[in-house]
Image (tube, grey):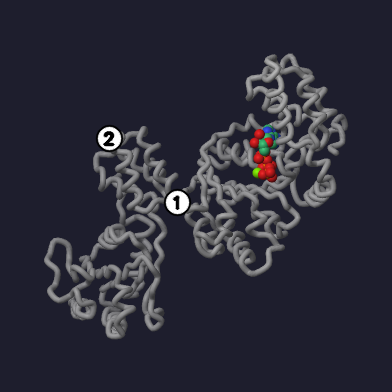
Amino acid sequence: MIPSVAQSRAARTLHEIYTSGRPLAYIRSSEELRIGRLLASLGLPLWTWSLTAGLQTAGAEPIPGTTDPRAALDFLIAHPHPAIFHLKDFHEPLRDSPAVRRRLRDVESACFDRQKFTVITSPVRAIPDELDRSLVFVELRPPDEVELAAFLHDEHPTTPPALLSQFARALKGLTLDEARYALRRALALQPTLSPASLPALLEEKRLLVNRSGVIEFLSTPTNVNEIGGLEGLKKWLFERQRLFELRDEVNSEIVPKGVLLMGIPGCGKSLSVKAIASCFGLPLYRMDMNAIFSGRHGKPEVVFAETCRMMEEMAPAVLWFDEIENAVSTQTVGGESGRMFGFFLTWMQEKTRGLFVAATANRIDVLPAELLRKGRFDEVFFVDLPLDEERLDIFRIHLERRGVPVDGLDLPQLTQFTAGWSGAEVEQCVVSAITKAKLADRPLNLQDLITTAVSIVSLSRTMKEQISHIRAWAFERAVRASPPPSRASKPLL
Ligand SMILES: Nc1ncnc2c1ncn2[C@@H]1O[C@H](COP(=O)(O)OP(=O)(O)OP(=O)(O)O)[C@@H](O)[C@H]1O
Ligand SMILES: [Mg+2]
């Protein structure tokens, strides 16, 4: 079936406003072409106005004298038939002329219930106070899949219908203008659209999120096997993977919506988030809280909310909030983070079901209790220092990754030298030992690892107090990502 723009979310919104009988709407958007398409899909004759051309319908000459905004309003008030009037950038005459402001209020009463619908579009919201109540203000969200598929079909009618929806999904989050660039980029590489065009389409999306300055697209796939230990987390993940795949068929309550990983630095929180994205087969985006708080992109709470909304359009995807305590901390003074937190809690409940949120936190004692309450995240995991057997697993992973076979190495000997180490420290030990062996021009042996290990002072030793504190705090509030320590396992510190 050929997709129709009239079925799109945006067209339905406009249709609802029109049928509710409100004669005046103000849409903040710079996508005039898109709005033209949407308005045309409502099925009434469409007139457009601009300061340079005046008022005209498709294929006809402009009405003489209507470049004057006041004359244009006079014309549409007198117009005897049902119609839609699209006034481009009309915020300027509204700002400059009291007579135009007055006349627009006349439009409201003259067009009420006459099937005449006037829509102002502007890239900015600039509504004079006295008109605030007369105009319905609309902020259109980016095109949905239906609108994108209809657009792709119009631009490239030979595209097979099966590909249309696949491409539309890939383009979600882009404006129609951006989608057009993406399409041209793909067509420049290959004159016919095929599944091989997808990477070129996605590239535009990557550029878009990078342009926002607060979202980073992470493209390094990480296999769950690259995580040592954390079996509890892995088991949970595999179960959720299946539910996530079924998200369009199952009850929304059981669709995985997010996970919070908190714990000790360097123990695999970031690594796990990357593995979650790969396990779900989804792109991973990271929200840069520092960039949001820098104020470079606007008021932090506004940027935060806008970015969260924009990311819904990127679904299905994993959105990672690193160091989420910065956004929601109870210790930050002032209303800003309080408002952000309030927004975040509501948003977590409402967001589209294809967007999975992964949040990570170190300073967990500053996290507000509401965030940890059941129902916000599907699970709150505590990522502790790895147990003996987990550290061995991490040694194995990092040695093998660097091409060192572990068969001949008696790794369990290392446990006694590495009590209280983080995964990052295990990795550091492996790298130093391999470097040492390389410099001596011989294969690595266990002694290299032991000598390096004894020279490393682990963070948990220097931060003993803090770590005990974090652990005590997390004990009641989170599920351990690792299995409980066995009797055979040495004390962690
Ligand atoms: N469980 C683990 N398995 C394998 N490697 C690990 C593990 N934990 C840590 N590492 C290694 O240490 C590095 C740092 O870990 P990661 O960035 O995931 O820690 P983190 O918990 O996010 O720390 P931070 O709180 O400092 O952000 C990883 O890139 C990985 O190479
Ligand atoms: Mg991290």
Categorize mark 1 by other alpha carbons within 10 Å: few (<14), some (14-19), many (20+): few
Where's ligand 2: which quadrant?
top right
- 211 with respect to 33 (left or right): right
Quadrant in the picture for residue 338: bottom right
Q: Find the residue positioned furthest to the front.
A: 439
Residue 86 versus residue 439 in the image, above or below? below
Q: Earlier in the sequence, mark 2 or mark 1?
A: 2
Q: Which mark is residue 211?
A: 1
Tell me the distance, in whole angstroms, between the alpha carbons under discs 2 and 1. 28 Å
Q: Position of residue 304 (x, y in %)?
A: 54, 59
Q: Residue at x 28, y 85 (%)?
A: 99
Residue 116 versus residue 306 in the image, above or below? below
Quarter of the figure with the N terminus: top left
Is residue 254 visible to the viewer in this orientation of the structure?
A: no
Depth check: give the residue in front, 328 or 34. Answer: 328
Depth check: give the residue in front, 295 or 146. Answer: 295
Q: Are marks 2 and 1 in contact (CB under 8 Å)?
A: no
Q: Kindly tell me whether mark 1's CB lies below 8 Å from ligand 2.
A: no
Q: Residue at x 39, y 49 (%)?
A: 145
Depth check: give the residue in front, 202 or 466. Answer: 466
Residue 257 versus residue 160 in the image, above or below? below
> Across the whole image, how many numbered discs are drawn on residues?
2
Q: Position of residue 203 (x, y in %)?
A: 41, 41
**Which structural element holds mark 1?**
helix
Q: Which mark is residue 192?
A: 2
Please name the amino acid that badge 1 sits on.
Arg
Q: Position of residue 446 (x, y in %)?
A: 77, 19
Q: Which mark is residue 35?
A: none
Quarter of the figure with the C terminus: top right
